[in-house]
């Protein structure tokens, strides 16, 4: 088990390193495009659309996470309602037969 965890962590480190290298290369390309005047308008448009895409992906992720939490909460409430002990209560009624309140028996 420890050996499996070691290789799993090593794989994550390699992925992180490759993503960092990719982001550095992208920043260098962005700087080179901004230096050249012919591509300035194009790269600005690409950056804006990339930010919009990233933002919509982030919003989608947050909404999905909240829906997942809501579904899990509903499942937990349902399962706990099945296994919880029933409360023994006695109804207090008036002379007309209307329920005024409840008494808990312990």
Image: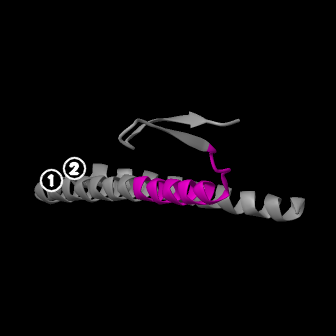
Q: Residue at x 88, y 59 (%)?
A: 2
Q: Residue at x 48, y 54 (%)?
A: 69
> Disc number at residue 34?
2
User: Magenta region, mostly helix, strand or loop?
Assistant: helix
Q: Residue at x 61, y 35 (%)?
A: 104
**Rendered image coloring scheme:** one colour
Location of the C terminus by quadrant is top right
Q: What residue range appears in magenta?
A: 66-88
Q: Is the residue marked by circle 2 packed among few (<14), some (14-19), or many (20+) residues within 10 Å?
A: some
Q: Position of residue 75 (x, y in %)?
A: 54, 60
Q: Is residue 12 left or right of residue 26?
A: right
Looking at this view, name the residue that lies furthest to the front.
95
> Disc number at residue 40?
1
Along the viewing direction, whichever of 91 and 35 lies nearer the viewer = 91
Residue 78 location, quadrant: bottom right
Q: Residue at x 29, y 52 (%)?
A: 55
């Amino acid at each position: 088990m420890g050996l499996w965890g070691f290789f799993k962590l090593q794989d994550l480190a390699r992925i992180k390193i490759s993503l960092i290298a990719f982001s550095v290369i992208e920043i260098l390309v962005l700087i080179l495009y901004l230096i050249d005047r012919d591509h300035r308008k194009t790269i600005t448009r690409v950056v804006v659309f990339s930010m919009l895409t990233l933002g919509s992906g982030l919003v989608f992720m947050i909404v999905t996470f909240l829906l997942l939490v809501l579904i899990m909460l509903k499942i937990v409430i349902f399962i706990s309602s099945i296994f919880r002990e029933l409360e023994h209560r006695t109804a207090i009624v008036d002379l007309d037969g209307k329920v005024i309140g409840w008494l808990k028996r312990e």
